[in-house]
Image (tube, coloured by chain):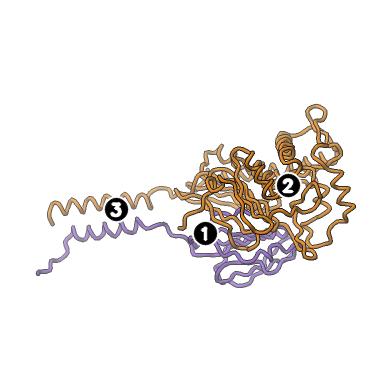
Amino acid sequence: MTRRAWGPADIALVAALALAAVAALPGGGSPGAVEVLSPGGAALWPLGAGRREVAGPLGVTVVEVGPRGGRVVASPCAGQVCVRAGEVTRPGQVVACLPNRVAVRLVGGASGEGVDAVAR
Amino acid sequence: MSRRAAQGVVGLLILAAALAWVRWGRTPAGPTAETRFLMDTLVTVTLWGAPGPAAEGALAAAFGALAAVDEELARVPGTFLWELNQTGSGPLTPAAAAVLEASLGWARASSGAFDPTVAPLLDLWDVPAGPHPPPHPDRLARAVAAGGWHRVRPGANGGVDLGGAELDFGGIAKGYALDRAAEALRARGVVDYLVNAGGDLVVAGAKGGAPWRVGIQHPREPGAFLRVVTPLAGALVTSGDYERAYEWEGERVHHLLDPRTGRPARGCQSVTVWAPTAIDADALATAVFVLGPAEGLRLVAAEPGAEALVVDADGRLHETPGFGRVAPAAKAR
């Protein structure tokens, strides 16, 4: 069997196949991150960012961003609903402290469990 | 390379170019979203389509519609509703007239389980203030006696006479506002959108060919869903005893009050209603929660187009036969 050097047509074939393969790939999503909304604006924190303090009209809300998602661990609000809500671990989930105007939402990192909104 | 092979290569190049154009060559459709604190909750408006000034304008219009309703019908100082409650009678704005008419209709249909005159009871319980003792039974009885939707009657010059009652549209105005936001989006040619006001939703179209995916919150497991659904165009509204609530001496105190007893309703943990309009879904979700699963689902069955999913006080699921049709379970991605 003899080996033949690649000609222009062969290279064009490989290029076409490679381009087609890349073009057919689904659009990529950003890796998972936690978006924190507050009166100071929106901030995107990477998973595992740890504890940070967020200022609101009532005082400081403490948000913890772990490897799986984010949660409110301390809040100056009376009801403490946001603290009891636990961790958001699926894209689309959100926990909000309405009195202190702080919200924590998991974004990106789409998975089979991801949702666009939570009816609650 | 043979002529046939060369034709194959040319064909592949054309295919690759077409795929590349689809992938990179046109304005990419995607989400345009914005979140604001509004109507005493967190509101996110998401559109799907080409980003740009038109999408930004549509978002602004939707938020404008929501804010307009809030500024008129929230029961806080300075709004139209606040002033109406102070004077006890007077002319109505178009928005107030529409919401009052719908409120009284649902009050009648639900035999008072939904009642727009619960304001004094809400003030007595003051759930947003956090854990504190419940109101004295005598005060509750007086507040129940002072209310009642049947007191509200037409007033002079097409206005209204509250008959000594005080209105609160907390169980319906958010739905009305969602409908106005959806209307504003459609007026700007937006066909694919999801408006989320604190977990009450209006939805239409899709996101790039895939349906919108909505998780229905489990009432007792934070972070867990009862199911993930892909609702048809319309509204999906949930009333639950876990959202604005606290525990007091082992009892769950929440904001969904039974206007007939003056106390938090106990028949359900959560109620999710799908309806063509959010104003109806909102009022129905509250009414069904107060009525409980059996009577509540009968009310839904009598309302054409509405469907419901109920978690009763013991955690058992009940649903109307058509709920799975209007909110089918999402396929795993």
Q: Residue at x 47, y 58 (%)?
A: B332
Mark 2 Cα-neighbour bin, 10 Å: few <14, some 14–19, many ≥20: some
Residue that numbered label 3 is attached to: B16
What tint does the image give chain B? orange
Work out whether disc 2 and disc 3 sit on a shared chain: yes
User: Could you say which chain is coloured purple in the image?
Assistant: A
Chain ID at mark 2: B
Give the residue furthest to the front: B294
Image height of B217 relative to B188, above or below: below
Taking depth in this image into account, of A54 and B323 the one nearest to the observer is B323
Residue that numbered label 2 is attached to: B170
Q: Secondary structure at mark 1?
A: loop
Q: Secondary structure at mark 3?
A: helix
Q: Amino acid at mark 2?
A: Gly
Can the viewer see residue B61 in this picture? no
Chain ID at mark 3: B
